[in-house]
Amino acid sequence: MLTLEELPVEAVIMSALRNVRNYYNDGKRLCHSDDGVAPSTESTEPQAKKCAICFNNQWGSEITPNGKRGKSCGEFNQLTLRQLDSPEYAMSLRVSSASLKSFRDYEKQITSRGEALDRVVTKIDVARDERRSSLVFRVIRFLDGDELDTLNRPLKQEASSFPVTDGYTH
Protein backbone atom coordinates (compact mmCIF):
# COMPACT_ATOMS: atom_id res chain seq x y z
CA MET A 1 0.00 0.00 0.00
CA LEU A 2 1.38 3.37 -1.00
CA THR A 3 1.65 6.05 1.66
CA LEU A 4 1.48 9.84 1.29
CA GLU A 5 5.24 10.01 1.81
CA GLU A 6 5.78 7.91 -1.34
CA LEU A 7 3.86 10.37 -3.52
CA PRO A 8 3.98 11.82 -6.13
CA VAL A 9 3.72 8.81 -8.40
CA GLU A 10 2.95 8.44 -12.10
CA ALA A 11 0.91 5.31 -12.73
CA VAL A 12 -2.05 3.81 -14.53
CA ILE A 13 -5.19 3.24 -12.45
CA MET A 14 -6.09 -0.34 -13.32
CA SER A 15 -9.14 -0.65 -11.06
CA ALA A 16 -11.02 1.14 -8.32
CA LEU A 17 -12.93 -0.48 -5.47
CA ARG A 18 -15.56 2.14 -4.64
CA ASN A 19 -17.73 3.04 -1.65
CA VAL A 20 -15.85 0.99 0.92
CA ARG A 21 -16.88 1.98 4.46
CA ASN A 22 -15.40 1.38 7.93
CA TYR A 23 -16.75 2.20 11.36
CA TYR A 24 -14.32 2.12 14.28
CA ASN A 25 -14.97 2.54 17.99
CA ASP A 26 -12.07 2.71 20.48
CA GLY A 27 -9.65 1.74 17.70
CA LYS A 28 -11.51 -1.48 16.85
CA ARG A 29 -13.29 -1.94 13.53
CA LEU A 30 -16.84 -2.94 14.38
CA CYS A 31 -18.62 -2.62 11.05
CA HIS A 32 -17.55 -2.37 7.42
CA SER A 33 -19.07 -2.52 3.96
CA ASP A 34 -17.37 -3.50 0.71
CA ASP A 35 -20.06 -1.89 -1.45
CA GLY A 36 -21.46 1.02 0.60
CA VAL A 37 -24.92 -0.57 0.53
CA ALA A 38 -24.97 -3.04 3.44
CA PRO A 39 -22.59 -4.24 6.15
CA SER A 40 -20.30 -7.12 5.30
CA THR A 41 -21.22 -10.50 6.75
CA GLU A 42 -17.74 -10.37 8.35
CA SER A 43 -18.61 -7.27 10.42
CA THR A 44 -18.29 -8.04 14.14
CA GLU A 45 -21.04 -5.57 15.14
CA PRO A 46 -23.16 -4.40 12.19
CA GLN A 47 -24.60 -0.97 13.00
CA ALA A 48 -27.67 -1.16 10.71
CA LYS A 49 -29.16 -3.38 8.03
CA LYS A 50 -28.32 -0.85 5.30
CA CYS A 51 -25.64 1.85 5.12
CA ALA A 52 -28.15 4.48 3.95
CA ILE A 53 -30.10 4.33 7.22
CA CYS A 54 -27.15 3.90 9.57
CA PHE A 55 -26.69 6.69 12.14
CA ASN A 56 -22.90 6.51 11.74
CA ASN A 57 -23.24 7.25 8.01
CA GLN A 58 -25.11 10.54 8.61
CA TRP A 59 -23.52 14.00 8.58
CA GLY A 60 -23.10 15.15 12.15
CA SER A 61 -22.61 11.68 13.61
CA GLU A 62 -19.07 12.87 14.34
CA ILE A 63 -17.62 16.32 15.01
CA THR A 64 -14.11 16.79 13.63
CA PRO A 65 -11.27 18.30 15.70
CA ASN A 66 -11.79 21.65 13.94
CA GLY A 67 -15.50 21.66 14.87
CA LYS A 68 -17.03 20.61 11.54
CA ARG A 69 -19.71 17.99 11.03
CA GLY A 70 -18.51 14.67 9.68
CA LYS A 71 -19.49 11.02 9.50
CA SER A 72 -18.44 8.40 12.05
CA CYS A 73 -18.36 5.81 9.28
CA GLY A 74 -15.47 6.59 6.97
CA GLU A 75 -15.80 6.12 3.21
CA PHE A 76 -12.89 5.47 0.87
CA ASN A 77 -11.91 4.01 -2.49
CA GLN A 78 -9.11 1.50 -3.03
CA LEU A 79 -7.12 1.97 -6.26
CA THR A 80 -4.92 -0.62 -7.94
CA LEU A 81 -2.04 1.07 -9.78
CA ARG A 82 0.67 -0.11 -12.16
CA GLN A 83 3.70 1.89 -13.22
CA LEU A 84 5.01 1.66 -16.78
CA ASP A 85 8.61 1.11 -15.65
CA SER A 86 7.57 -1.97 -13.61
CA PRO A 87 4.22 -3.10 -15.05
CA GLU A 88 4.53 -6.61 -13.66
CA TYR A 89 3.82 -5.35 -10.14
CA ALA A 90 0.67 -3.75 -8.78
CA MET A 91 0.45 -1.13 -6.05
CA SER A 92 -2.51 -0.19 -3.91
CA LEU A 93 -3.57 3.31 -2.87
CA ARG A 94 -6.34 4.23 -0.47
CA VAL A 95 -8.30 7.36 -1.44
CA SER A 96 -9.70 8.74 1.82
CA SER A 97 -12.96 10.62 2.15
CA ALA A 98 -11.01 13.92 2.04
CA SER A 99 -9.91 13.06 -1.53
CA LEU A 100 -13.00 11.34 -2.93
CA LYS A 101 -14.37 14.47 -4.64
CA SER A 102 -11.01 15.06 -6.31
CA PHE A 103 -10.90 11.45 -7.57
CA ARG A 104 -14.52 11.50 -8.79
CA ASP A 105 -13.94 14.80 -10.64
CA TYR A 106 -10.82 13.35 -12.26
CA GLU A 107 -12.63 10.18 -13.29
CA LYS A 108 -15.46 12.26 -14.77
CA GLN A 109 -12.90 14.33 -16.72
CA ILE A 110 -11.42 11.14 -18.25
CA THR A 111 -14.71 9.38 -19.01
CA SER A 112 -16.24 12.53 -20.55
CA ARG A 113 -13.47 12.24 -23.20
CA GLY A 114 -14.60 8.68 -23.94
CA GLU A 115 -11.55 7.18 -22.24
CA ALA A 116 -11.08 4.81 -19.32
CA LEU A 117 -8.81 5.25 -16.31
CA ASP A 118 -6.72 2.22 -17.34
CA ARG A 119 -5.73 3.98 -20.60
CA VAL A 120 -4.19 7.06 -18.98
CA VAL A 121 -0.95 7.74 -17.14
CA THR A 122 -2.02 9.66 -14.04
CA LYS A 123 0.13 11.74 -11.73
CA ILE A 124 -1.06 11.37 -8.15
CA ASP A 125 0.29 13.91 -5.69
CA VAL A 126 -0.55 15.35 -2.28
CA ALA A 127 -1.92 18.84 -1.71
CA ARG A 128 -1.30 20.00 1.84
CA ASP A 129 -2.83 22.91 3.70
CA GLU A 130 -2.72 23.80 7.39
CA ARG A 131 -5.63 21.48 8.28
CA ARG A 132 -5.35 18.40 6.07
CA SER A 133 -3.78 16.65 3.13
CA SER A 134 -5.68 15.48 0.08
CA LEU A 135 -4.81 13.71 -3.15
CA VAL A 136 -4.61 15.49 -6.50
CA PHE A 137 -5.00 13.60 -9.81
CA ARG A 138 -3.67 14.91 -13.15
CA VAL A 139 -3.48 13.48 -16.67
CA ILE A 140 0.10 13.03 -17.85
CA ARG A 141 -0.67 11.36 -21.18
CA PHE A 142 -2.75 8.72 -22.91
CA LEU A 143 -1.27 5.25 -23.48
CA ASP A 144 -0.36 3.91 -26.90
CA GLY A 145 -1.07 0.37 -28.15
CA ASP A 146 2.25 -1.19 -27.09
CA GLU A 147 1.92 0.21 -23.58
CA LEU A 148 -1.63 -1.13 -23.31
CA ASP A 149 -0.39 -4.59 -24.36
CA THR A 150 2.34 -4.44 -21.70
CA LEU A 151 -0.12 -3.48 -18.97
CA ASN A 152 -2.59 -6.17 -19.97
CA ARG A 153 -0.04 -8.94 -19.36
CA PRO A 154 -0.60 -10.94 -16.17
CA LEU A 155 1.08 -9.78 -12.98
CA LYS A 156 4.04 -11.67 -11.58
CA GLN A 157 2.98 -14.03 -8.85
CA GLU A 158 4.99 -16.15 -6.50
CA ALA A 159 4.93 -19.88 -7.17
CA SER A 160 2.39 -21.86 -5.21
CA SER A 161 3.70 -23.64 -2.13
CA PHE A 162 1.42 -26.58 -2.92
CA PRO A 163 2.80 -29.41 -5.06
CA VAL A 164 1.25 -30.03 -8.46
CA THR A 165 -1.03 -33.09 -8.37
CA ASP A 166 -3.01 -35.10 -10.86
CA GLY A 167 -6.25 -34.55 -8.90
CA TYR A 168 -6.29 -37.93 -7.19
CA THR A 169 -5.21 -38.95 -3.71
CA HIS A 170 -3.01 -42.00 -3.74
Image: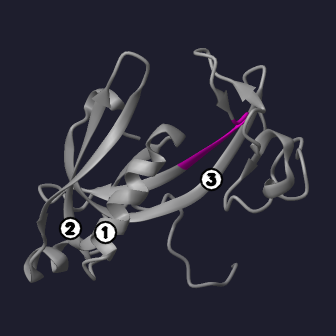
Q: Which residue is mark 2?
A: 120
Disc 1 crowd rating (10 Å Cα; few below 14, some 14-19, many 20+) is many
Span highlighted in magenta in the image: 71-76
x, y percent for residue 141: 10, 64
**In the rendered image of this protein, does residue 120 appear above or below residue 10?**
below
Instruction: State the residue at coordinates (73%, 27%).
Output: 62
Q: Image quadrant for the C terminus?
A: bottom right
**96 left or right of 71 in image:** left
Q: CA distance from mark 3 to mark 1?
A: 19 Å
Q: CA distance from mark 1 to mark 2?
A: 6 Å
**78 left or right of 10 in image:** right
Q: Is residue 134 visible?
A: yes
Q: Quadrant of residue 83?
A: bottom left
Q: Which residue is mark 1?
A: 117
Q: Is residue 31 visible?
A: no
**In the rendered image of this protein, does residue 145 appear above or below residue 35?**
below
Identify the mark nearer the N-term, 2 or 3: 3
* Circle 2: residue type: Val
